[in-house]
């Protein structure tokens, strides 16, 4: 969160980027980045701006009837109030006229997780005499990075998730052996119980999907449509959780209920090797100190799957940002398919690596690990990643 303690570092970044300031905007929670940086809580029912200059004190622009969201705004920092649109536009112009300012804007909506500013607001800001550039680099460095304590929390959650996934796969196999196979939603409930015992929290899920259901990347098991996990099935377990106030861990594991077919093994190996190709590229580039962006890792994973003949069945990006606030975060995405994310993977940011192959009506396979960029190395969680299909 922006504070007197963090302000100097932000202003150094602004000066290094030759920016006059960072202009934050929000209306009714449309800009989660602004909300997170300003520490706003609850719904913002009127338009707000906050200008962080390269030198001097930040200035807020608040509606007269809504001081509540500004409770955490330092008292030494000015807040200008408005009621009507004329006053709002006048106050804004006085702050930013003839200035080069960063906003949560991505040209052509190339990076949707960054593109938070409505077109009309951009028009208003430009009409005030300002030049708008993307805040992408600032978001990566200020909003998306993890602290050492957050990294440690993520690592603990990652090891717990791996253990819970292993237990769930073994339980599914044991239930088959006793002649009472478990349903997908029952495995989901078992995982949620394990989260509670471990002191982990999640916002929804997890996903437990057998064979053809796993071909839907966003499948959700349901007691209303129970699907038993039986011998001959493959089982996909996608689970995500965090410690309270911690950073999410997010993993996908694959098991075969009995010996897998040659078809299943072929698909699994393609996915595993694609995952490893992305990780190898990132590991080598980061260790060498060579700049790398998420889109390059996406290309590396996608090339492997395409070479195995499954290119059209890899429907989603290779990975998403995991920032300190959200599972699907606003930092660099591992993506050159759904979006054109050319932001560099800088020290302190985390993300998932999760290629998949989806064959409708037949099979879905995904392997997911997480990664964190250190100063000169890539840290992958959990500590032991899946090499072979679990056969239970």
Image (cartoon, rainbow, N blue to C red):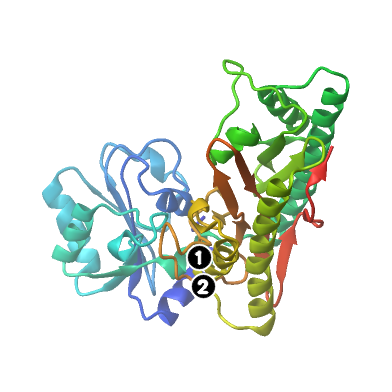
- Of residue 267 and residue 160, the one placed in the foreground of this image is 267
Query: Which quarter of the picture shows residue 136?
Result: bottom left
- Work out whether mark 1 precedes mark 2 in sequence or the reverse, and give the earlier one: 1
- Percent across and percent down for residue 125 are 20, 61
Of 365 and 259, the residue lying toward us: 259
Determine if residue 367 is in view: no
How far from the left and from the top, in percent, is residue 373? 65, 68
Q: Residues within 10 Å of mark 1 (few under 14, many from 20)?
A: many
Total residue callouts: 2
Q: Is residue 270 above or below residue 54?
A: above
Residue at the location (32% across, 59% down)? 109
Residue 349 lies, in percent from the top left, at: 60, 63
Which disc is residue 191 wearing? none
Q: Is label 2 in a helix, a strand or a loop? A: loop
Whether the residues at callouts 1 and 2 have beta carbons within 8 Å, the answer is: yes
392 left or right of 320 in image: right
Q: Where is residue 209 in the image (x, y as percent from the top left)?
A: 64, 33
Q: Is mark 1 on a helix, strand or loop?
A: helix
Mark 2 packing: few (<14 Cα in 10 Å), some, or many (20+)? Answer: some
Q: Can residue 219 be seen in this view?
A: yes
Residue at 59% from the left image edge and 21% from the top image edge: 222
Going by the image, does 167 lie left or right of 157?
Answer: right
Q: Nearer the viewer, mark 1 or mark 2?
A: 2
**Which image quarter holds the C terminus?**
top right
Q: Residue at x 82, y 56 (%)?
A: 384
Query: What residue is disc 1 on?
Result: 140
Give the distance between the C-alpha atoms of the residues marked 1 and 2, in whole angstroms: 9 Å
Q: Mark 2 points at which residue?
A: 344
Instruction: Classify residue 290 by image quadrant.
Output: bottom right
- Residue at the spot 64% in from the left edge and 62% down from the top edge: 274
Which residue is more in the foreground, 88 or 205? 205
* Rendered position, 52 above or below 358: below
């Amino acid at each position: 969160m922006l504070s007197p303690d963090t302000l100097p570092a932000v202003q150094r970044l602004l000066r290094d980027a030759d920016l006059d300031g960072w202009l934050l905007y929000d209306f009714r929670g449309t800009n989660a980045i602004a909300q997170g940086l300003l520490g706003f809580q609850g719904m913002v029912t009127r338009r707000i701006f906050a200008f962080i200059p390269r030198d001097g004190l930040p200035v807020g622009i608040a509606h007269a009837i809504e001081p509540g969201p500004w409770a955490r705004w330092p008292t030494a920092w000015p807040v200008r109030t408005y009621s009507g649109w004329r006053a709002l536009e006048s106050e804004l112009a006085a702050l930013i006229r003839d200035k080069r300012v960063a906003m949560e804007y991505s040209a052509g909506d190339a990076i949707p997780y960054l593109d938070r500013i409505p077109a009309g607001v951009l028009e208003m800001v430009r009409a005030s005499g300002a030049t708008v550039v993307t805040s992408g680099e600032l978001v990566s460095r200020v909003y998306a990075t993890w602290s050492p304590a957050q990294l440690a929390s993520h690592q603990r959650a990652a090891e717990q998730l791996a253990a819970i996934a292993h237990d769930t796969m073994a339980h599914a196999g044991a239930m088959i052996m006793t002649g009472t196979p478990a349903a997908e939603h029952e495995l989901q409930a078992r995982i949620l119980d394990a989260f509670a015992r471990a002191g982990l929290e999640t916002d929804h899920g997890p996903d437990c999907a057998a064979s053809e259901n796993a071909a839907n990347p966003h499948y959700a098991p349901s007691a209303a449509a129970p699907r038993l996990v039986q011998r001959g099935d493959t089982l996909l377990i996608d689970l995500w959780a965090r410690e309270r106030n911690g950073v999410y861990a997010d993993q996908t594991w694959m098991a075969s209920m009995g010996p897998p077919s040659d078809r299943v093994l072929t698909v699994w190996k393609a996915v595993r090797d694609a995952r490893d190709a992305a990780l190898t590229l990132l590991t080598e580039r980061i260790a060498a100190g060579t700049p790398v962006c998420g889109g390059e890792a996406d290309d590396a994973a996608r090339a492997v799957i395409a070479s195995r003949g499954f290119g059209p069945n890899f429907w989603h990006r290779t990975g998403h940002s995991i920032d300190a606030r959200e599972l699907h975060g606003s930092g660099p995405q591992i993506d050159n398919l759904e979006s054109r994310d050319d932001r560099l993977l800088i020290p302190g940011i985390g993300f998932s690596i999760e290629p998949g192959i989806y064959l409708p009506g037949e099979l879905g396979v995904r392997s997911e690990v997480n990664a964190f960029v250190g100063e000169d190395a890539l840290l992958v969680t959990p500590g032991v990643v899946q090499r072979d299909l679990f056969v239970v």
